[in-house]
Image (spheres, grey):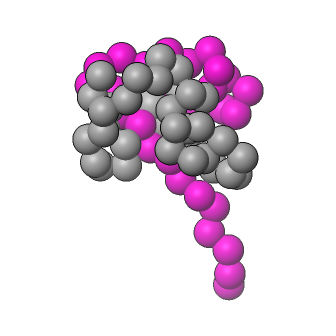
Amino acid sequence: MRILVNGVWRESGAAGLDRLLAELGYQDAVVSTAVNGEFVATGARAGTRLADGDRVEVLAPMQGG
């Protein structure tokens, strides 16, 4: 299926958000996620199913001052 990740279309076989993050190399990273504009908490990622055309945002916290 095609999923828009941070503004870039990607082909993925991941059925869930947790699997997509692993596929993208984010499985151990501290990131915030949203699907179709809705925040998804870390604990809810495994239960968040993805569908063709979904928009996923993966954001890393910024550091510095």
Q: How many marks?
A: 0
Residue situated in front as seen by the camera: 24 or 64 = 24
Q: In this view of the protein, which residue sits in the foreground, 22 or 36?
A: 22
Of the 4 image quadrants, the one containing the N terminus is top left
Residue at 66% x, 41% y is: 27
- At 41% from the left and 37% from the top, the residue drawn is 56
Q: Position of residue 16 (x, y in %)?
A: 52, 20
Bounds of the magenta segment: 36-65
Secondary structure mostly taken by the magenta-highlighted segment of the chain: loop
At horizontal 30% and vertical 39% (from top left) the residue drawn is 10
> x and y percent of residue 55 in the render?
35, 34
Q: Is residue 7 shown above or below 3?
A: below
Is residue 39 visible in this depiction of the protein? Answer: no
Task: Please tell me in which quadrant of the rendered image residue 43 appears.
Answer: top right
Q: Is residue 55 a member of the stretch shown in magenta?
A: yes
- The structure residue drawn at horizontal position 36% and vertical position 17%, both measured from the top left corner, is 51
Q: Nearer the viewer, residue 65 or 5?
A: 5
- The quadrant in which the C terminus is found is bottom right
